[in-house]
Amino acid sequence: MTESLSSNIVVEAAEKLLRDLADPQKINHTKDDNWQSTLWTTLEDSGLPLSWVSEKLGGSGASMTEGFALLHLAGRYALPVPMAETMLAGWLLSQATIPSPSGAMTVAPLNPNDRIMLDGEGTLSGHARAIPFALQSDHVAILAQAPSGLHIALIKRSDCQYKSIPSLSGDDVADLTLKCVKPVILRPAPAHWTSKTLALMGATARSLQIGGALQWILMQTITYSTERVAFKKQISKFQAIQHNLARLASETAAATTAASSAAQSLCMEDICSEGVFLEASSSKIRCAEAAATSCAIAHQVHGAIGFTAEHTLHRFTLRALAWRDDFGNETYWSIALGQAVASLGSNQLWPLITSR
Amino acid sequence: MLRAEVREFLAQQIHDKAFDPHNPLSNIGSDKAFAQRVAQRGWIGLTWPREYGGHERSHLERFVLAEEFYAANAPVRHFYVADRQCGPMLIAFGTNRVARDIVPRIASGELSFCIGMSEADSGSDLFAARASAEKTADGWLINGTKIWVTHAHLADYMVGYFRTSKPTEENHRGGISSFLIDMRSKGITVNPIRQMTGEADFNEVVFKDVLIPDDHLIGELGKAAEQATTELSYERAGPERFLETFYLLPALIEALGSNPDERAAEGLGQLVAQLHTMRRMSVSVAGMLQAGKHPVVEAALVKDLGTTWEQALPSKVRSIASTLDRSCSSHTQLDASLCMALKIAPKFTLAGGTNEILRGIIARGLGVR
């Protein structure tokens, strides 16, 4: 159901790179952090973090489709560096034809209920909760609100105050506070954008990452069940385990289908369309559900060994669960989607569903 | 565009009072005249070769057809099973004479089929079936009893699974053969069985020395197990597997009004997201069928998820609607629909392969069984 996500040259090259430098097992056991700068430098040199930025604006100019495939891959490796965040930041800046700087970037606000305001002096103020990789980022791409409309800005991360907060994923997360921050560049956002538009793109990105992580989790859990012996047989021989693996496979398929459907809609339609709203919100809702069920099954099958720091399972399960919270959690999107469907009226539901 | 044509057709049928889309039981209504009107539009046997009365259109178009019929609760019972699996089975495995006689008459909306698989002592373990087919000089002699046979009281033909030899050490599932049976044959007695819904939609079918022609054997002797694997992927993952309670969603939206509170909106949004995803997965399987693949695991997975979802839908809709003012008229419709939907719900995860069996098939596909 997701062949299109893995069969192209950009992705194949990226996978080779990640196999060499981002192996979760190696990273989990390494005693120092040198792998991180090596990995990030190599990713930057390959142009991958700025895939969604045209060459004219400082990027590598890959297609939307290729970029989405990279996000799925980032999930499949539980990448502990800000590749997805830099990709999203680059994408956001490009929407206002703002050139992307080199180096790691992150994006704010993450929570669609947070507001960063642009004042009459052209400075930015506000709080953005739970921004991933803020500490590792040199710059932040901002979606800001003003009486005159939405704006997109590039700011220096060092101009923000930040407070680290507990991280579910293991990646650095911080609350950012902007107090009259002067942007490096500031431009209006595209005409029909709303405060949800960035969140729709971010939600789709996280859905793809969750799908990728669940695929790794599924493969790993199947392998473990065929290797672990209890009561004189592989635990995969027990029907309870088989049925749970079947459920895990079903949830993984649902997640990857929903995510790739949303990605496809973003490649083919205007981001402000009704179709993209249905697809992106549905994928985030469904992937969150899939993550919760799948991670519980995976840990249950693995038993105590999967609960250790030494085992790599948590690198994937905790990220899958944490990504649910980014760019609107499933409650936020369920409410938004439900309100939209209700306001369309009962005889518009079927036409909406079948428009895809 | 096919979808627009089908919608227009169904709107006309509803206008002419051919069926009531709000009635949960409309969908299991058997209506031969309706079937013939559908056939006249070229919508039965949509994917079959022209030489069998088919229209050589794609599985994706068939998907569109099926989902429009099911979303509207249209009375497809007369032709749906024949269209979905019996016709394709006869084309693939039936003798030439039989296929050329029977299949075009399915496509014309004339013939209706039922499936005889379960017995009192064998359901999921299909290959433990004991009802037998014995080779005689004049044909096959069928004896025994099938049970839970949906639509047997109205069907013209049955595709039935009967034992032709004993299973062996090497092949526990061997010895079962599939046959085409004319339901008007002498020796067949159909006894309707009342269900907890109040309907008598399935039956016990007793065979006493029923003689059927030699060439009514479908496929190879003793090979029903192998044939069933191919056949069943056709029937596992269509939109009918998650749309059987769909009518509750528009009814819920009607009852909620255009500005529901956050709790109701959240519940509704969740259901729509799940429905959308289910549909995208089902479309994906249709695409695989179109590409000539045999998506046995994918189809099992979609049926498992889909039937579980449509079964849970009535209770979820009930919960979402529970804080609403019950006195308005759109509630009466919703409450009536919910009552029947809750009574029908248990069957969704039982019919056509229980979810436990499906999970076993998925597990095998994952390489763990």
Image (tube, coloured by chain):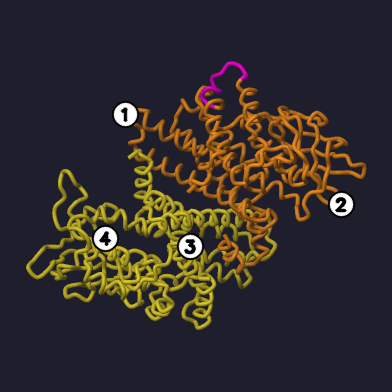
Q: CA distance from mark 1 to mark 4?
A: 36 Å
Q: Amino acid at mark 4?
A: Met
For label 1, the SS is loop
Q: Is residue A159 left or right of residue A254?
A: right
Q: CA distance from mark 2 to mark 4?
A: 69 Å
Q: Is residue A11 left or right of residue B143?
A: right
The residue that label 4 is drawn on is B117
Q: Is the residue at mark 2 from the same chain as the one at mark 3?
A: no
B316 within the magenta span: no
Query: Visible in this render: residue B328?
Result: yes
Mark 2 or mark 3, whichever is nearer to me = 2
Q: In the picture, one chain is orange; tell me its letter.
A: A
Q: In the picture, one chain is yellow; tell me its letter.
A: B
The residue that label 3 is drawn on is B243
Q: CA distance from mark 1 to mark 2?
A: 69 Å
Mark before the other along the chain sequence, 1 or 2: 2
**Marks 1 and 3: CB-CB under 8 Å?**
no
How crowded pointer 1 is (Cα within 10 Å; few <14, some 14-19, many 20+) is rated as: few
What span is colored magenta in the figure? Answer: A23-34
Q: Which mark is residue A148?
A: 2
Q: CA distance from mark 1 to mark 3?
A: 43 Å
Q: Which mark is residue A231?
A: 1
Q: CA distance from mark 2 to mark 3?
A: 46 Å
Q: Nearer the viewer, residue B199 or B180?
A: B180
Q: Chain of mark 1?
A: A
For the view shown, which residue lies furthest in the top direction? A31
- In the rendered image, the quadrant that contains the C terminus of chain B is top left
Q: Is residue B304 above or below residue B135?
A: above
How far across and how far down the image is residue B221, in percent?
17, 58
Mark before the other along the chain sequence, 3 or 4: 4
How far across and how far down the image is residue B53, in percent?
34, 73
